[in-house]
Amino acid sequence: MAKLIAQPAIIQTVGTPVEEIIGRLNTKTAEISIARMHSRKGWLQPGQIRDFSEYILVFKGALQVKTRRRALLVRAGEAVMV
């Protein structure tokens, strides 16, 4: 079934707001999170263990993702699955 998602849900965070397009808040989807965010240089987020799949696509700049086993530098045009 196709469902039009006309606008994201805005989630206020410590840094900049996150625009959740698909996820628990906007579409009642627990298995996946697709959101858009803009982060300033040096932004940090505490480590978390998610109970859903998260996919991160970097459009500009770079993002360092640290896991228990390694750190990944994700550059513009690249993606990471967490």
Image (cartoon, grey):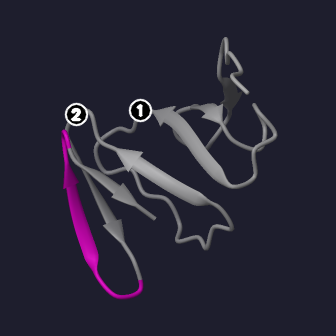
Query: Disc 2 designates what residue?
Result: 60
Residue density around tag 2, few if under 14, some if 14–19, many if 20 or more, within 10 Å:
few
Q: Residue at x 77, y 44 (%)?
A: 24
Query: Disc 1 designates what residue?
Result: 38
Circle 2 SS class: loop
Residue 73: % across, % down: 20, 61
Q: Residue at x 28, y 43 (%)?
A: 41
In the rendered view, tell whether residue 12 sits above or below residue 24. above
**16 or 58, which lies in front?**
58
Mark number displayed over residue 11: none
Q: Quadrant of residue 29?
A: top right
Q: How many marks?
A: 2
Q: Quadrant of the N terminus?
A: top right
The Cα–Cα distance between marks 1 and 2, rounded to whole angstroms, is 9 Å
In the rendered view, tell whether residue 31 sits above or below residue 46. above
Whichever of labels 1 and 2 marks the residue nearer the N terminus, that label is 1
In the rendered view, tell whether residue 11 sits above or below residue 64. above
Circle 1 SS class: loop
Q: Please state which amino acid type lies under the numbered disc 1.
A: His
Seen as rendered, the residue at the extreme top is 6
Q: Quadrant of residue 9?
A: top right
Residue 25: % across, % down: 78, 38
Q: Check if residue 20 falls in the magenta segment.
A: no
Q: Please state which amino acid type lies under the numbered disc 2.
A: Lys
Residue 30: % across, % down: 75, 52
Residue density around tag 1, few if under 14, some if 14–19, many if 20 or more, within 10 Å:
some
Q: Residue at x 49, y 59 (%)?
A: 45
Magenta region: 68-77
Residue 16: % across, % down: 52, 34
In this rendering, position of residue 70 left or right of residue 49: left
Q: Residue at x 69, y 22 (%)?
A: 2
In this rendering, position of residue 32 left or right of residue 70: right
